[in-house]
Amino acid sequence: MTAPLVDSHCHLDFDAFGEDLPAVLERARAEGVARMITVGTAQAVESAGSALELARAHPDVLRATVGVHPHDAAAADEALLAEVERLAADPLVVAVGETGLDFFYDNSPRDAQREAFRRQVAIARGVKKPIVVHTRDAPAETLAILREERAADVGGVIHCFSEDAELARAALDMGFFASFSGLVTFPRHTDAIRDAARRQPADAILVETDAPFLAPKPHRGKRNEPAFVAHTAAFVAELRGDDVEAFRHTTTDNACRLFGLPRP
């Protein structure tokens, strides 16, 4: 029997998934994906709980996070952050985020990103749940904020890992796992990511889709979905010289431990 998998980061509340969501979940189950974390990226109070609503509709396979993405940090006013804090206490919410810094796109002013990031770390510490971190072109400042805001109290994950082994080691010192997406399978500009995946300790590595984005080979260019995490897991296992079944077990155990998931 194929070992179970956890897709540690997907966005099933996005418009890319609509009426065919039941089929998406069924294809995931067929690939052995027993749990999926659907990640909150609130842009307004009214939408802050959309990922949680999905988890409530499918509690057998889904858990949720709540948070404000750095792209939307300019919208993170007191009302929205208060709603994130309220929702974060729900038992089906397993983490706060995704939050962090994105200095590549700069879709929100950097000061707004920094403030929203700090506030969400504080929310996570308050509810004693891990943090889902997005970081792009801001490695030093991301680590600095995590240290200054005592994120090590709850730990978390650097999702869709796109940095190098040095950042992974520094994050691990604060209790942060590294999660690898289909990005690691791409042929260009991935040497540092692959090196980090090889070096990451077995007890602190996760796999994800970041669906609907970043479909791994051989599905690159298509809408990504949780079933495809099996391809990423197989690729990373081979990269590390690990048995695929053993690696699936390892990443599932890690996800269950980090997010407090029921064992599949």
Image (spheres, rainbow, N blue to C red):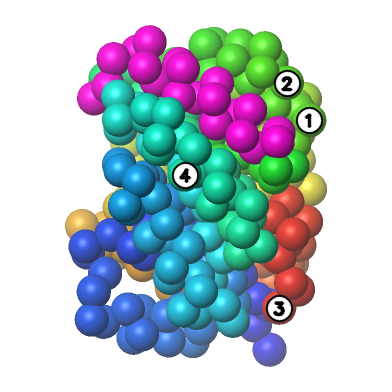
- Work out how far the residue at label 4 is from the one at label 2, CA to CA, in angstroms: 22 Å
Asked if residue 19 lies left or right of residue 7, the reply is: left
Q: Is residue 167 above or below residue 95?
A: above
Q: Earlier in the sequence, mark 4 or mark 1?
A: 4
The answer to whether residue 207 is visible is: no
Give the magenta part as a residue range. 107-126
**Residue 153 disc label:** 1
**Residue depicted at 70% across the width and 36% down the height:** 126
Q: Residue at x 70, y 43 (%)?
A: 127
**Which of the labelled discs sits on residue 83, or is there none?**
4
Amino acid at dot 3: Pro
Of the numbered discs 2 and 3, the one sitting upstream in the chain is: 2
**Which residue is the site of mark 2?**
150
**Predominant SS of the magenta segment:** helix
Marks 4 and 2 close (CB-CB < 8 Å): no
Q: Is 106 or 195 nearer to us in this picture?
A: 106
In the picture of the structure, the residue carrying the numbered disc 3 is 264
Q: Position of residue 189 (x, y in %)?
A: 35, 31
Looking at the picture, does residue 74 appear above or below residue 250? Answer: above
Amino acid of disc 4: Glu
Frontmost of labels 1 and 3 is 1
Q: In this image, 153 relative to 49: left or right?
A: right
